[in-house]
Image: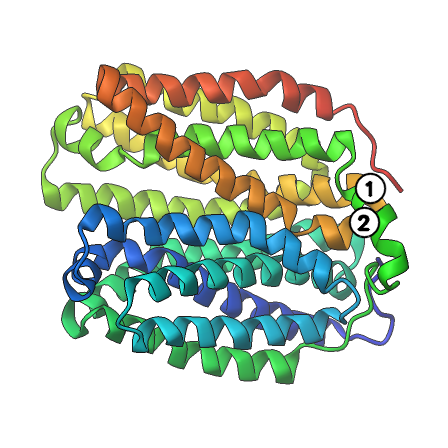
């Protein structure tokens, strides 16, 4: 993929802003449900644990439905796919607001997750055309940055709205913002021709390249590194309350600092990926091990715990642009199809990490949760070192 010679830098930057805002809406929709689970449970007549399956449904929709939808729409121009996915996503979210059935709510979340995955994949494919190769990592970081900023800002704000206006009010506001973002996509996103426009006859060789062994190893790195993090992060609040022994109000401050560090790290990670994506992955893996090690050894000391969270936040999602960059380059001609796969790997890691963390917590307590996450990151280190020696598949 090469940037269009007729596309000005200003037009390209405006298109990137529209993608950032779109992923901000997607990320807010995905995670704001966590802050209003009890309200959803009360309104739909289910338990809070059952309401929690709305998170699982979205993640599974993204992991499985995103790549499937990408493959099914490989012949569509990426601009068309972007606005169609955004429109359908908003309709699925609106369906959540008007339905009174938990089963339909669950289905709407799964559909929204699949559309989220397809949108992000199409956005990454478009970035490869909007920007020159030397700025690809930074473009990827802008797309991911919308999700990172939604975690740091959109989710807390959405939760506040949900507690004040009800959970349907939170999603109604998201849909309203999404309509404005959709208009921005239609106005600002130029027509882009990417590697996926070759029709159904090219799908089979694209699948072979997209799922080549080297690409699969890179995806395994994503599963292990994000899985290791979310083994711990899923249970970070009880860790801070019981091990670090800080107050409820202080927990919010610690998590806000982590969220801001995550957003900063995502953009810094895009810059680092442009310089050397392989080295960025390796260094991030090492620093992540050190941060989790500090959390385990000094988790009872609030100042050192705060340092561990800040460092963790900076590298934890800062490695994702490098992961996306490496998958795109190693997939070669199948980079359009492969573009949605890192998001699937990340969400698979998140789901697996939450599950492993729960088992560790039940069996051995909060310190064991950190140990399991640390061991997953350690197990990944040989893979990140090995893949650093692989050249791009051009």
Q: Residue furthest left?
A: 247
Q: Quadrant of residue 243?
A: top left
Of the pair 299 and 347, the residue shown nearer to us: 347
Q: Is residue 166 left or right of residue 345?
A: left
The numbered disc on residue 12 is none
Of the pair 156 and 34, the residue shown nearer to us: 34
- Label 2, residues with CA under 10 Å away: few <14, some 14-19, many ≥20: many
Location of the N terminus (image quadrant): bottom right
Of the pair 138 and 123, the residue shown nearer to us: 123
- Label 1, residues with CA under 10 Å away: few <14, some 14-19, many ≥20: many
Q: Residue at x 71, y 36 (%)?
A: 276
Q: Residue at x 77, y 50 (%)?
A: 335
The image position of residue 362, as x and y in percent, is: 23, 22
Q: Residue at x 42, y 57 (%)?
A: 149
The residue that mark 1 highlights is 209
Looking at the rendered structure, the secondary structure element under dot 2 is helix
Q: Is residue 227 left or right of residue 32?
A: right
Looking at the rendered structure, the secondary structure element under dot 1 is helix
The residue that mark 2 highlights is 334
Say if 191 sits above or below 31 in the image: below
Q: So how many labels did they put on this image?
A: 2
Would you say residue 10 is visible in this rendering?
A: no
Would you say residue 41 is visible in this rendering?
A: yes
Of the pair 115 and 156, the residue shown nearer to us: 115
Of mark 2 and mark 1, the one earlier in the sequence is: 1
Q: Is residue 40 left or right of residue 71?
A: left
Location of the C terminus (image quadrant): top right
Q: Are marks 2 and 1 in contact (CB under 8 Å)?
A: yes
Q: Quadrant of residue 302?
A: top left
Q: Is residue 234 left or right of residue 197?
A: left
The image position of residue 209, as x and y in percent, is: 82, 41
């Amino acid at each position: 993929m090469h940037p269009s010679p007729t596309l000005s830098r200003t037009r390209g930057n405006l298109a990137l802003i529209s993608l950032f805002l779109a992923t901000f809406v997607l990320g807010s929709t995905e995670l704001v449900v966590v802050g209003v689970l009890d309200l959803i449970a009360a309104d739909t007549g289910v338990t809070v644990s059952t309401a929690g399956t709305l998170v699982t449904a979205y993640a599974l929709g993204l992991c499985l439905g995103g790549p499937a939808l990408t493959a099914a729409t490989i012949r569509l121009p990426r601009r068309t796919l972007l606005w169609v996915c955004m429109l359908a996503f908003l309709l699925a979210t609106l369906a959540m607001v008007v339905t009174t059935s938990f089963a339909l709510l669950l289905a709407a979340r799964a559909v929204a997750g699949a559309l989220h995955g397809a949108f992000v994949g199409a956005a990454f494919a478009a970035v490869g055309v909007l920007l020159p190769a030397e700025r690809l990592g930074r473009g990827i970081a802008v797309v991911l940055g919308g999700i990172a900023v939604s975690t740091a800002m959109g989710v807390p704000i959405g939760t506040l709205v949900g507690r004040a206006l009800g959970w349907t009010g939170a999603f109604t506001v998201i849909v309203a913002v999404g309509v404005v973002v959709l208009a921005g996509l239609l106005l600002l996103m130029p027509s882009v021709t990417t590697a996926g426009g070759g029709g159904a006859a090219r799908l089979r060789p694209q699948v072979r390249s997209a799922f080549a062994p080297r690409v699969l190893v890179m995806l395994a790195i994503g599963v292990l590194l994000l899985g290791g993090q979310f083994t711990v992060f899923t249970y970070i609040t009880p860790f801070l309350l019981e091990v670090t022994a800080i107050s409820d109000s202080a927990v919010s401050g610690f998590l806000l600092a982590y969220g801001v560090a995550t957003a900063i790290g995502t953009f810094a990670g895009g810059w680092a990926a442009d310089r050397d994506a392989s080295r960025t992955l390796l260094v991030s893996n090492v620093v992540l091990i050190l941060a989790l090690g500090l959390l385990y050894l000094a988790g009872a000391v609030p100042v050192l715990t705060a340092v561990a969270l800040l460092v963790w936040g900076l590298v934890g999602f800062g490695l994702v642009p490098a992961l996306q960059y490496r998958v795109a380059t190693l997939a070669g001609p199948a980079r359009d199809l492969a573009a949605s796969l890192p998001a699937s790997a990340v969400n698979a890691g998140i789901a697996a990490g939450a599950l492993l963390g729960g088992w560790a917590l039940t069996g051995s307590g909060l310190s064991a949760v950190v140990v399991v996450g640390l061991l997953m990151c350690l197990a990944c280190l040989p893979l990140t070192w090995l893949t650093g020696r692989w050249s791009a598949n051009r």
